[in-house]
Image: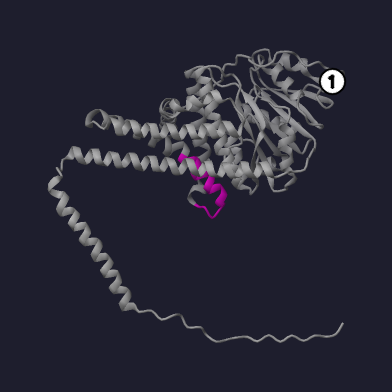
Amino acid sequence: MDNQKFQIALDNREIKPPSRNVAREKLRTIIVSGIFSIMLIICIVIFMPLTVLTWSGLFVYSSIVSLVIFLFILLIRYFAILFMAYFYTTRYTVLSKPGYYPFVSIIVPVYNEGKVLHSSIESLLDINYPNYEIIIVNDGSTDDTAEVGESLVGYHRGRTGLVKVSLINKPNGGKSKALNAGIQYSEAQFVLCMDGDSQLTPNTLRMAMRHFDDPTVGAVAGNVKVQNRKRVLTDLQALEYLEGLNLARSAQGFMQMVNIIPGPIGVFRKVTLRDAGFYSSDTFAEDADVTLKILAKGWKIVYEPNAIAYTEAPGTIYQLLKQRYRWTRGILQAIRKHKRYLYNPTVNFNNSFIMWSMFYEALIWPAMNIFVNLYFIIVALFYGIHITLFLWWVGIAVLDLMSAIYCIAAEKEEFRLVPYAIVYRLFFILLIDVTKAMATVEEFLGFRMTWGKLERTGMGRTASPKPVSGAAGVK
């Protein structure tokens, strides 16, 4: 090859910036400011004599401005979530991922779940995945859970082959310790953690596991849906899961920073849980706590909308408020436990962003919603702006209807849930926010609380899975 020589000529001349006429710029600024000032003075001179200044008038005008500002904040929040969720859904539908089928252990912690354990295990045996086992962890139940679990031990016919079912009996220590027992007993590199009453759809594992072909993904958050519908309260919760929880997770999935891996369905690399120190028992929201620990270690958490778990929602107001009370206090405990990320975003920016969003949703937004509703009702009663307040509520209802239609269309859900959006925010969410506010006050005052237990009705399938032969062992 002939040697070729290249010569590069460097231009070291300094380029002078374009000249500015500073005096002309100042004169133009003075003229423009003067014109606006004159126009403002003219408006004041013309309209001031027509204005009657009273404290009540000022209060009404400030209330109308507050209505507009609050609605504007709501619009920004809604459309930010909607746009990110839409971008995630769009990318999700066009992006193809290869199948990934490593061995997985499904950990089923149970405490007094005798009514629903059969149906939960039956749904797990129907999973369309070639390589998994089921580990039941009985956390010191006082009902017939242990007997039901022992009857399930062995190899069972699954959709794709034989599935091993094991049982661990341990003293009562809480869900987090039960999950840790199952995780440490498992020899798989991936674990699916769920609730004892959850029922998974057949493609859950197949859809969730494909995300782990990316070695930076440490966990996959699934899609939780309400099973026991056809009642007003549970239908409202079904809409809440779609619009309030899954929509937010879709937006967080766009950033690969899901803030809470839901208890009914979460899939993990075992090394990720080991890095995070496994589940902890020092909060009432072990799922939020372990999520923040995983994010702090630099792992990505993605959302898989087709990894679906059906769960039984509270059927009475009392049970619902107890559940949300515990959720709120648990999230606040997790935030306080990881509060250094609130103060110093340089430690881990992703964690700081998630923490501030959780702080906003748990503390600021409920307080703002309660105050705004009370304030505007008082203003409407005493200062006669009923029409304005009505139009404001209509605007919020339309916003919720838009979100509900989008969520139901995106997830191919029941369209009959859409009309609930009219009363969803004005009554249901307001009730939840009042509960959150009370839980926040009691958490900061240090009131003692207990875990609580949702009474199950056993709505799922009741047919027993048929064992084949052999035993998987009881510990």
Image spot of residue 316 (x, y percent): 50, 17
Q: Residue at x 77, y 23 (%)?
A: 125
Quadrant location, the N terminus:
bottom right
> What residue is shown at x 30% (from left), y 34% (from top)?
388
Q: Bin the neighbour count of mark 1 within 10 Å (Cα to Cα): few under 14, some 14-19, many 20 and up.
A: some
In this view, 199 is above or below 218:
above
Callout 1 secondary element: loop
Residue at 62% over, 41% down: 89
- Which residue is depicted at the point 60% across and 34% down? 410
Q: Position of residue 109 (x, y in %)?
A: 67, 25
The quadrant in which residue 467 appears is top right
Mark 1 lies on residue = 471
- Could you tell me which quadrant the C terminus lies in? top right
Quick check: 176 above or below 172? below
Q: Position of residue 178 (x, y in %)?
A: 67, 28
The quadrant holding residue 306 is top right
Q: Nearer the viewer, residue 259 or 175?
A: 259
- 355 magenta-colored: yes
Say if 28 sits above or below 301 in the image: below
Q: Tell which residue pokes out farthest to the left in this image.
A: 49
**Residue 450 shows in this picture:** no
- Residue 460 or residue 167, whichever sits in front: 460
444 left or right of 268 in image: left
Q: Position of residue 440 (x, y in %)?
A: 43, 33
- Magenta residues? 344-360
Q: Amino acid at mark 1?
A: Ala
Q: Is residue 7 magenta?
A: no
Q: Is residue 123 visible?
A: yes
Secondary structure, magenta segment, majority class: helix
